[in-house]
Image (cartoon, rainbow, N blue to C red):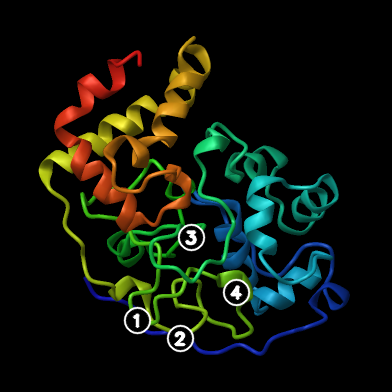
Amino acid sequence: MAIAPLAPAISIRERYGDIVSERWPVIVEPLHEEMLSSWLHRLAYANGVAPRAFARVLGLTPGMWSASLDLKLPGDIARQLCANTGVSSDQLSAMTLSHALPKQLLLPLRNSRRRDRSTWLQFCSQCLAEDSQPYFRRRWRLATRVSCTKHGCRLRDRCPCCRSRIAVFNGNRLVPQHFCARCGYDLRRASIIALSPGAKWFDRCIDDICRPEALTRSPSGRALIRRLLSMPTLVGIYSAKVLTSLSTAARTRCVEKLTCQLSDWLMDDG
């Protein structure tokens, strides 16, 4: 699939919040299952503001500002976004990770250089390449998810060029969020990592089990979450590790090993 070239550069407006009227010039509509941070990055880019500068527009300090808003959106920032964009409070809430996703299974906000440790976000390069406006999905934050349900390939959690995590929030340059903030690599061009049919099937089963209604309404929901988090210990590959602490590649190895043991593993009372 053809990939559009990088859009022309737009001058960064550091004091953007002081020079515009209440409604910002360019309004960006949330996309299906889009994560709040992804929408904020697209909103900033569309209005000519780099991510770190946009944090200041919202009255926030740089760092993992947008990723933190995924977890908890303060009321004052929600009201500002509603007023400036016309997006409803319900739409904003639906993009946060507190909406319907089990928080115990979310990848933690971390900046580890170790290749076997988790990063905060995963992505599918094929999804990004097919998007008219590349964006990051909420369910890519789940530690239990290692494959793309649409394309069947393994998800990635690092830039394949420089091996750094996805860190759009750190960007000082005005580029779309699908370009690595560290080296500029186009994540849409990342090669496809295949999964075995059994591993894809296992991943789908886990995804079905992790649906909010299944975890919240089932009396065994908490026990199931504990069992999912203990997968690395159960397979004997990463002793004393929990699922959320491991990279996508490491978690995939756990899935591959457990593929033929799904039924016994889930039903075991021990």
Name the residue type under label 1: Cys
Q: Residues under labels 1 and 4: Cα distance?
A: 23 Å
Closer to us: mark 3 or mark 4? Answer: 3
Helix, strand, or loop for circle 3? loop
Please indicate whether residue 210 sits to the left or right of residue 57 in the image. left
Proximity of marks 2 and 1: CB atoms separated by less than 8 Å: yes
From the viewer's side, name the closer residue of 159 and 179. Answer: 159
Of labels 3 and 4, earlier in sequence is 4
Which residue matches tag 4? 45
Of labels 1 and 4, earlier in sequence is 4
Q: Residues under labels 3 and 4: Cα distance?
A: 24 Å
Name the residue type under label 3: Thr
Local packing at callout 1 (Cα closer than 10 Å; few below 14, some 14-19, many 20+) is: some
Which residue matches tag 2? 183
Q: Residues under labels 1 and 3: Cα distance?
A: 16 Å
Q: Residues under labels 2 and 3: Cα distance?
A: 17 Å
Residue located farthest toward the left when viewing the structure as drawn = 197
Closer to us: mark 1 or mark 4? Answer: 1
